[in-house]
Amino acid sequence: MVLALTVMALICGCASNQNTTGNATTASLEGDNPASLKCVQDGGGLQKSSGDQNTVYCIFADGTVCNEWGYYNSSCKKGECKRTCQNIGTLEEGWYDCKGNLILWDKCNGETPLKTSC
């Protein structure tokens, strides 16, 4: 139960000011990055990708996920791209964006793509 709540908190981006520790963590607001700030100000949480550590996603309560710079530049908007659980039962199981890019490795089978806590 504790593990499930911890993973949900990471996916939710509840604590958008946490430092990175391991693969599945929230991103930090370093150096007043305008894309990160816009995401958080608009109610999103930040998540570094498990697949590409240089990619940070903005994740919203409705399950929308956008590359933080795509959201900042309005090429991705709330409601357009929902995260999905893919590759269930494999080592690649986890949350993916609508283009098939890995957001976070996770045992997500049967979970809702919507943020359910925070």
Image (tube, rainbow, N blue to C red):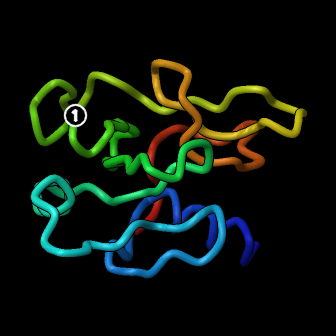
Label 1 secondary element: helix
Can you say which quadrant of the picture contains the N terminus? bottom right
Q: Residue at horizontal 78%, vertical 26%? A: 87
Q: In the rendered view, tell whether residue 33 sits above or below residue 61.
A: below
Q: In the rendered view, tell whether residue 34 sits above or below residue 90.
A: below
Q: Position of residue 34 (x, y in %)?
A: 10, 58
Q: Residue at horizontal 79%, vertical 36%? A: 92
Identify the image quadrant of residue 42: bottom left
Judge the density around disc 1: few (<14), some (14-19), many (≥20) Cα neighbours within 10 Å: some
Taking the image as shown, residue 64 lies to the left or right of residue 79, namely right
Choose between 8 and 94: the one closer to the eye: 94
Quickly name the residue at label 1: 70
Q: Residue at horizontal 77%, vertical 47%? A: 107
Going by the numbered disc 1, the residue's amino acid type is Gly
Taking the image as shown, residue 69 lies to the left or right of residue 27, namely left
Q: Position of residue 95 (x, y in %)?
A: 60, 39
Q: Position of residue 97 (x, y in %)?
A: 48, 29
Taking the image as shown, residue 11 lies to the left or right of residue 85, namely left
